[in-house]
Amino acid sequence: MELRINGQLVTVPETIMTIDDLVHHFKLKNRTIMVEHNHIILRAYDHEKATVENGDTIELVQFVGGG
């Protein structure tokens, strides 16, 4: 399946069915992230319900501390 992630076309396994699966795939599960799925910002508790389809646009933003 092909998704546009952070502006780049990325091929991911067909076994990825939800945003939660995608977050696990990229090993971001225990990180503070923001997910935008087809121009809609998702809350963390919606990641398990939001299904992913070929051609979807996803932005994954990881928050990093610093100073």
Image (cartoon, grey):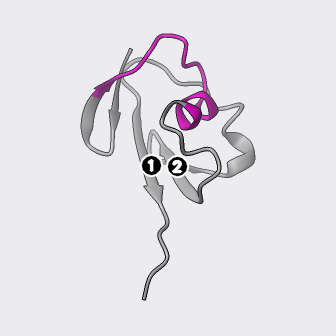
Answer with left or right where residue 57 lies relative to residue 33: left
Mark 2 and 1 residues: CB-CB less than 8 Å, in contact?
A: yes
Q: Indicate the secondary structure of the residue bearing disc 2.
A: strand
Residue at 48%, 19% in the rendered image:
53
Horizontal and vertical percent for residue 23? Answer: 55, 38
Task: State the residue position of label 2.
Answer: 35
Answer with left or right where residue 2 lies relative to residue 62: left
Dot 2: few (<14), some (14–19), or many (≥20) neighbours within 10 Å?
Answer: some
Between disc 2 and disc 1, whose residue precedes? 2
Quadrant placement of the N terminus: top left
Task: State the residue position of label 1.
Answer: 60
Identify residue type, mark 2: Val
Answer with left or right where residue 31 lies relative to residue 64: right
Q: Is residue 18 magenta?
A: yes
Please give the range of residues in magenta: 10-24
Identify residue type, mark 1: Leu
**Disc 2 to disc 1, C-alpha distance:** 5 Å
Location of residue 28 (image quadrant)? top right
Q: Is residue 41 above or below residue 65?
A: above
Q: Indicate the secondary structure of the residue bearing disc 1.
A: strand
Horizontal and vertical percent for residue 60? Answer: 44, 49
Q: Is residue 2 magenta?
A: no
Task: Tally the marks.
Answer: 2
Between 39 and 66, the one lying in front of the other is 66
Horizontal and vertical percent for residue 54? Answer: 40, 17
The residue at the far bottom in this view is: 67
